[in-house]
Amino acid sequence: MPVRKKSKFEQWFSFSRHQRRFGADKVYAQFNDVDLDKLKTTRIEGTELTYTHGSAKDLNEHIEQLKQEFVGQPQLNHYHASLIVLIRREVDSQNNYAKFKALWLDERDFLLRSLNIRWLISACDTFIDFDEDACLKATLMNAVVLINTLKLQETERFLCDQSITENPKHQQHLQHQRYALFDGTSAFAVGTDDTLRNMRWRLEKVCEIHPLGQIVIEIFDRLQRDENNNVYSRFKQRHTREKTRWW
């Protein structure tokens, strides 16, 4: 079993939890009566895009540091990230979550085009943690499990410094015989297998249930791009049977 999550009562006695909300009034004032159209058309200025690693305890400092992740991007992206930070740090969470959900329902297509996978997943996590719609939570959990599994798989490659060199004998084996992996699971028949195509069909059916299920489809589609080098894009390059393609 994983470590038990602290109750809200236990969390209340955590000084660091309260410390992470210091300066909330100043931050909150920036996001009252925002003009979404202006945020969509105004770019964040800067010379270099830099990702944060961890987060500053000071709320104002963290919000300001996040701007560096969105250099050259619409200010709406930073506003979206800031709402998530306010929600996570329990700054008027109910009201800020209402703003967050309304933003997604009104600007879904813009956000899908504009945000990277990091922030699409952060949005999914936020919906899962705070929304009351069990169907939406279950749908978006598909994206979270998918990306976290890929993070582990690609990180293991980095840790082990493994080159990806195909073994022709193994490739032929997969075309003609079952290769067992674990607990009854068998390997993917490279080039012809219909497993991912069928999964894609099921995923689309599930994601049609709620308008925000499109976040999952967007993330899955991005994984197929060659520039987003990962196990999905690499297997797409190896796939030869048009009838069973999943992208």
Image: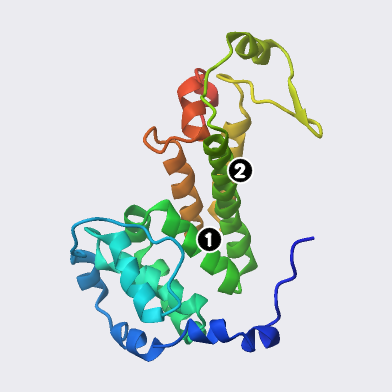
Q: Crowdedness of circle 1 by 10 Å Cα count: few (<14), some, many (20+)?
A: few
Q: Residue at x 57, y 50 (%)?
A: 148
Spatial distance from mark 2 to mark 1, Cα to Cα?
14 Å
- In the rendered view, tell whether residue 228 sits above or below residue 26: above
Q: Amino acid at mark 1?
A: His
Residue located beneath label 1 in the image: 210
Mark 1, secondary structure of its residue = loop
Q: Is residue 11 left or right of residue 37?
A: right
**Residue 140 occupies quadrant:** bottom right
| 25 to the left or right of 98 | left
Q: Position of residue 160 (x, y in %)?
A: 57, 34
Q: Residue 66: where, in percent of width, then height?
A: 34, 67
Total marks in image: 2
Residue in front for this viewpoint, 123 or 203: 123
Q: How is the image coloured?
A: rainbow
- State the image coordinates of residue 19 (x, y, percent, origin top left): 49, 85
Specify which label sits upstream in the sequence, 2 or 1: 2
Count residues near mark 2 (Cα–Cα under 10 Å), then give few for <14, some for 14-19, many for 20+. few
